[in-house]
Image (tube, rainbow, N blue to C red):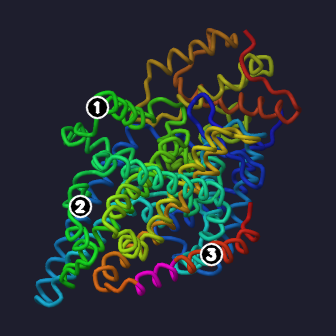
Amino acid sequence: MIDASARLSLLTPEQVPIHFELASLGARTAALLLDLLFMGAALIVYALAVGWLADLVGDRVQALGGPFLLLGLFAIFNFYFVVGELRGQGRTPGKRLVGIRVVARDGGPLSAGLVLARNLTRDFEIYLPIQVLVAGDSVAALGPPWLRGLCFAWLGLVCLFPLLNRHRARLGDLLAGTLVVEQPTATLLPDLTAEAGADPDAAAQAGYRFTDAQLDVYGIHELQVLEQVLRQPPEQQDTALLDSICAKVRRKIEWPPDDAVNDPRAFLLAFYAAQRHRLEHELLMGRRRARKRR
Amino acid sequence: MSAFTLGSVAFRLEREEHWRELEALVVRVERGGVHTLSTSELARLPQLYRGAVSALSVARAISLDQGLVRYLDALCARAYLVVYAPRRPALQALGDFFSHRFPALVWNLRRPLLLAIALLFAGAVAGTVLTLDDPARFDTFVDAAYAQERGPDATRDELRAVLYDSEEATSLGSFASYLFTHNAKIGLTAFVVGLAACIPALLLMFINGLTLGAFLAIHLQRGLALDLLAWLSPHGVTELLAVCLCGAAGVQIGAAVLFPGRHRRLDGLARAGRDAATVAAGAMALFFIAALLEGFFRQLVQAMPVRFAVAALTAAGWSAYFLLLGRRAARTLPR
């Protein structure tokens, strides 16, 4: 399933949903260009190697160079992506560098049939339109103008297909039932409550004690927005932003105005810890408060 | 307000070590493949994965720490792709492909295949009749570059010379590999264009038939029909079968678009596309064999009976392969 924020959601055999971000078209284009570059390099290296070997073995066998060249070039041209995706579990060298990969839409394994289906169409989807762009004249000799127009329209449609659907799928992706997603890379960040002191009593020692009534003002959404702000690395901390949030929270929860706060970040951390404790406790009791009351 | 530590923090502290262990294993597999793991690590991987997945599901229920849930989601996604990746030795997979999967898929594809063959023959008959009627039509049916010196104005001797032409053995390899790449490309096109509701794939079959028929007609007029068939059939049986296979594969994906049946159109297309692409890839092997026959055998052997014998042999071989082996293998194919 694809949701509105371009995330692919799969159900593992353990019945737990996991998520992948769809790769952006920019990343895919970059990966394609890199792969074409590698493929071009492979073609040139192969051609040079065959030529060198043919020179080495002498005239009698030299005639074999031609067929070997042609077959090898055909194989590289048509099967570079197939072999790359099969070997790299959906990651050709270009995709690996950009950090994207191919997955089956239903979460199944990347079988050979699937990889073939999404790559045998490449000739048609990518190389042919490039050919038309580079040497349009030779294709223009195809037939009557209406037929040419039809061909151009069809090629244009095929070429621009990823722009036209929310799966950002190529024609080959549709045919194989695959999607290109970002390689997930999240690192485990330290728990913010550890910074504030794991239990509310420690927060209280820092001089802040919140009542249940004060903690019932905000909901889960606000807590997680606060988490995002607090998680920004120290060099990117926006003190003005922290100040304004701090002031707003204090006004909302009716914190005594005469009680001065020296360090807004420390105050917010303490508030975060107490608030999360309260909300998680409520969650255990089966009360999920998604948003603030007012 | 109670004094105990946060449940979600305790939960994380208990399991964090295992997550980090799993992450390290996953990173190693992603970098260097599964062979980089030792036996004990390999056994540990699914255990750790299951632990992480269940932790993810618990964390979603009890933890409001977004950083934690995001991390677990990503970790499980990566581990899932590693744990449930298919892994078979390449050679074994290749052997299985030709002994089971390919013939079985072709057997399942028999109806569109018969349709493609029928269209090819219909095209051939139409091409023959039309060209006999008016030889000038030959130029319509056959591309000038392909026809070369053969045509409605060619004499009997000129046509005969092409059929019994033997080139120098040294250039035959180039010729064969040219034939292979050329034909394989046509096959791939026939497969892909099927996506447009079958029509282009069917049309391609018919047009190929027309070309064949046009050639047959000009040879018929000069009493060379049998010679042409002898020249054509040793490789033609394999080559035309491969073209028809690609066409049938194209028809299959077109049919999935047109008649989705019980499935969603997108799912049906994906299902048909995988099988069809497998068949098209298998057809590449047929093209390769055909090119060898065309490039070497046809140029080296001139005797008509031998040429026909080879044609009969290939026809019998493919029939047995697809009809007998394919039918049996299709029963074991997981649906």
Q: Nearer the viewer, residue A163 or A186?
A: A163
Of the residues tagged 2 and 3, which is closer to the observer? Answer: 2
Q: Earlier in the sequence, mark 2 or mark 3?
A: 3
Q: Is residue A231 left or right of residue A254?
A: left
Q: In the rendered view, does A107 fall on the left or right side of A214?
A: left
Q: Which residues are magenta?
A: B305-314
Q: Are marks 2 and 3 on the same chain?
A: yes
**Mark 3 lies on residue:** B41
Point 56% across, 33% down: residue: A6
Decide: few, some or many residues near mark 1? Use Cα within 10 Å; few <14, some 14-19, many ≥20: few
> Along the line of sight, which residue is nearer the eye, A266 or A54?
A54
- Residue B262 seen in this snapshot: yes
Q: Is residue A165 left or right of residue A133?
A: right
Q: Are marks 2 and 3 in contact (CB under 8 Å)?
A: no
**Residue at (70, 56) in percent of width and height:** B52
Q: Quadrant of residue A202?
A: top right
Q: Which mark is residue A144?
A: 1
Percent x, y of residue B216: 38, 61
| Amino acid type indicated by mark 1 | Pro
Position of residue A44 measured from the top left corner of the image (x, y, whole percent)? 20, 65
